[in-house]
Image (cartoon, rainbow, N blue to C red):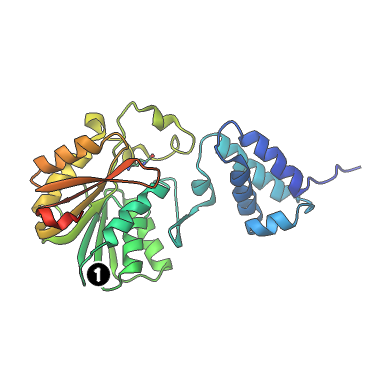
Amino acid sequence: MAAEPLTLRQALLESRTQLASCSDSPAVDAEWLWSHALHRSRSWLLTHPEWPLTPAEQARGESLICRRQDGHSVAHLCGECEFLDFSVRLTSQVLAPRPETELLVEQALHGLPHRARVLEWGTGSGVLALAIARARPDCQILALDHSRAAVKLAQSNALRLRLKNVRFVRADWRHPWPEGTFDLILGNPPYVALHDSHLQSPGVCQEPRSALVTPARGTQTIRVLAAQARRHAHRRTRLLLEHGANQGDVCRKIVRRAGWGRAKTLLDLAGLPRVCLASLQHHRLGR
Ligand code: GLN
């Protein structure tokens, strides 16, 4: 006699146990992954605990759980991720957007002038540029990335969201930027040091190193960006850079040395130093 098919309830329970050692949120991860395997919503999953899995569904679900155990993020396994009030497609060639990066968007939108020109460096999946473009259709956003795959993905995300005021262009960070000045320059550059143990963490260990790591104890890219951005700034330009939780002081120093008159550090929702805000004039930074 053929074995009874596994029910969804059993699969969820088993997966939760399997993920307990590699995830802070094993139950939620299991729900997302099984919902992806079954092409059903999470709420459908929870209302159909007795659903008998077909062999194909079971194989898809179990393979996702195995890959999660190998350190892939749930966002990458599902190929999609929510950020603020929208979602974007993801591939293994870009970072999964982090919740702390929402602070950059909040600050970017704060006091952004009408019809502003915005430049984002290192856009990855495009979330930052897309969030600004959605909130401010009057502004023009130019977003750069050194990875061809990232630019292609960001373009397709813009297309899905039907955004016409954002342009994604491939550009190496060492090369000059497109001509002109910008009202806002922002970026979430690589800022992790080469041997940081954070790189071994589940979720992070399978992400592209080039989007995470930079020499000089994680500050080289910030240095280059601060200097490049200074050349494309006018009197009222604001610079916003995400950095590591232990890089607040060094980041302000770097930015000031690059010729930005004033720099201050902003805290993320967890209360950690996360973003450096700089301008050429003192009064532009507010309180
Ligand atoms: N905050 C990211 C992390 O936790 C690092 C992102 C970056 O280097 N830009 O992995």
Q: Is residue 227 left or right of residue 74?
A: left
Q: Can see residue 174?
A: no
Q: Is mark 1 within 8 Å of ligand 1?
A: no
Badge 1 local density, few (<14 within 10 Å), some, or many (20+)?
Answer: some
Instruction: Tell me where residue 83 appears, x and y as whole percent.
Output: 43, 56
Quarter occupied by residue 191: top left
The residue that appears at 60% across and 53% down in the rendered structure is 36
Which one is nearer the viewer's eye here, 53 or 140?
140
Q: Is residue 100 left or right of residue 188?
A: right
Residue bearing mark 1? 139
Instruction: Tell me where residue 240 appears, x and y as whole percent.
Output: 23, 51
Residue furthest right in the image: 1
Looking at the rendering, the quadrant in which ligand 1 lies is top left
Q: Can see residue 269?
A: yes
Give, as a three-letter code, the residue at label 1. Answer: Cys
Instruction: Tell me where residue 270 appears, x and y as whole percent.
Output: 40, 43
Q: Is residue 239 left or right of residue 230?
A: right
The residue that appears at 9% across and 52% down in the rendered structure is 231
Q: How many marks?
A: 1
Which one is nearer the viewer's eye here, 28 or 149?
28
Residue furthest front in the image: 287
The residue that appears at 39% across and 47% down in the rendered structure is 269
Instruction: Tell me where residue 219 appears, x and y as whole percent.
Output: 22, 35
Quarter occupied by residue 168: bottom left
Instruction: For the N terminus, give its image quadrant.
Output: top right
Secondary structure of the residue carrying numbered label 1: loop
